[in-house]
Amino acid sequence: MSTPAPELSNVEKRALKAKAQSLEPVVKLGHAGLSDAFVRSMDAALTLHGLVKMKFSDFKDQKHELAPQIAEKTGSTIVMQVGNVAVFYRAKGAAETQDDGQ
């Protein structure tokens, strides 16, 4: 469905993790789960910000299975996952590339 995100180097990941520390969660995965509306809002947040912190409000037991699915559906990369929070990154120009492929 979406193009796979390029792998990040350790240096890039470290820099993104440091930047993510000051971010507040922009998107929350609630009772509706991995719905189309959630994927659209996550995609919009990635397009706008590039680096997005997401909180698992519900589905906390399934967060390790859901995070890779979210990354795949949005064409992003998981930068880190700690507790009930995950950070995703997608280069700002990647959204246009992803739309062209559909």
Image (cartoon, helix red, strand yellow):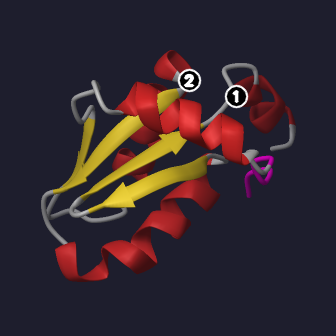
**Residue sitting nearer the eye, 68 or 2:** 68
Q: Is residue 88 left or right of residue 37?
A: right
Residue 44's mark? none
Percent position (x, y) of residue 14?
Answer: 56, 39
Percent position (x, y) of residue 62?
Answer: 30, 80
Location of residue 51 with respect to 40 vertically, above or below: above
Among the two numbered marks 2 and 1 on one chain, the one whose residue lies closer to the N terminus: 2
Mark 1 residue element: helix
Crowding at mark 2 (Cα within 10 Å: few <14, some 14-19, many 20+):
many
**Residue sitting nearer the eye, 36 or 89:** 89
Location of residue 32 with respect to 62 vertically, above or below: above
Q: Is residue 2 magenta?
A: yes
Boundaries of the magenta span: 1-6
Q: Are marks 2 and 1 in contact (CB under 8 Å)?
A: yes
The prevailing secondary structure element of the residues shown in magenta is loop
Q: Is residue 53 left or right of residue 2?
A: left
Q: Which quadrant: the N terminus? A: bottom right
Give the amino acid type for the residue marked by disc 2 in the picture. Thr
Q: Is residue 45 left or right of residue 100?
A: left
The number of numbered badges drawn on the structure is: 2
Crowding at mark 1 (Cα within 10 Å: few <14, some 14-19, many 20+):
many
Q: Residue at x 24, y 36 (%)?
A: 25
Q: Is residue 70 left or right of residue 72?
A: left
Percent position (x, y) of residue 57?
Answer: 13, 58
Write down the quadrant of residue 99 in the picture.
top right
Give the amino acid type for the residue marked by disc 1 in the picture. Ala
Q: CA distance from mark 2 to mark 1?
A: 6 Å
Q: Which residue is mark 2?
A: 47
Q: Which residue is mark 1?
A: 95
Q: Is residue 43 magenta?
A: no
Q: Residue at x 77, y 37 (%)?
A: 98
